[in-house]
Amino acid sequence: MLKLLGACLVLLGSSGLGWYAAGRYAARIHILEELEQALQFLYGEIEYAGCDMAELLGQLALRGQLFSAFFAQMQSKILLYDGNPFSYHWRQNLTAVTGYETLQREDLELLCAIGDNLGNMDRQTQLHTIQIFRKRLGEIVVQARREYRAKAKVSGVIGVTAGLFLAIILI
């Protein structure tokens, strides 16, 4: 009876790990989609309202979910101005993004490039740059969705299969 209970726990645990891995792929997509919305908001506000970056980051902190702490920290860094450039604070505070660890190298490179290019050009150049980043981000989101469809199922199946294999070995 104890072996059977242990086998069930192993099966549940390994299945949970498989679904956890699948959830990480979904979390990456949610982060990228929220960043895409933030870039759309920035574009609209810069083009039509002409707001300064500190005000925009404050508005994004209120609107965001996964990025809200990040945008709030960025706003406070801009308002305090300690002599370091915007891009320095952007890179330092990226770990405040909820789910940061699920991002891949190319996602982080894009995030860093966005920070390197925000707030240090004239209005038209900045709008053009945001458009370029939105396009690149859109391509990454499409690729992430494709990967999710393929890898989420595989992760779940591998978790269950590994659990069954270990349960059989234990019994």
Image (cartoon, rainbow, N blue to C red):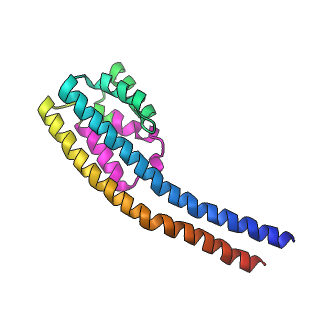
**Residue at image point 43% right, 33% down:** 68
Task: State the quadrant of the C terminus.
Answer: bottom right
Q: Is residue 8 left or right of residue 137?
A: right
The magenta-colored residue range is 89-117
Q: Position of residue 149 (x, y in %)?
A: 43, 64
Viewer-proximal residue, 73 or 58?
58
Would you place residue 148 above or below residue 160 in this image?
above
Residue placed furthest toward the top? 80
Q: Is residue 130 left or right of residue 146?
A: left
Q: Position of residue 30 (x, y in %)?
A: 42, 47
Would you place residue 107 above or below residue 21 in this image?
above
Viewer-proximal residue, 11 or 72?
11
Please, what is the dominant secondary structure of the magenta stretch?
A: helix
Q: Position of residue 136 (x, y in %)?
A: 24, 51
**Residue at image point 76% right, 71% down:** 7
Is residue 137 something one can see in this rendering?
yes
Q: Is residue 95 left or right of residue 10?
A: left
Based on the displayed image, in which of its 4 quarters is residue 83 positioned? top left
Is residue 81 something one can see in this rendering?
no
Q: Is residue 136 magenta?
A: no
**Residue at image point 48% right, 46% down:** 99
Q: Is residue 4 left or right of residue 129?
A: right
Viewer-proximal residue, 28 or 115?
28
Q: Position of residue 40 (x, y in %)?
A: 27, 38
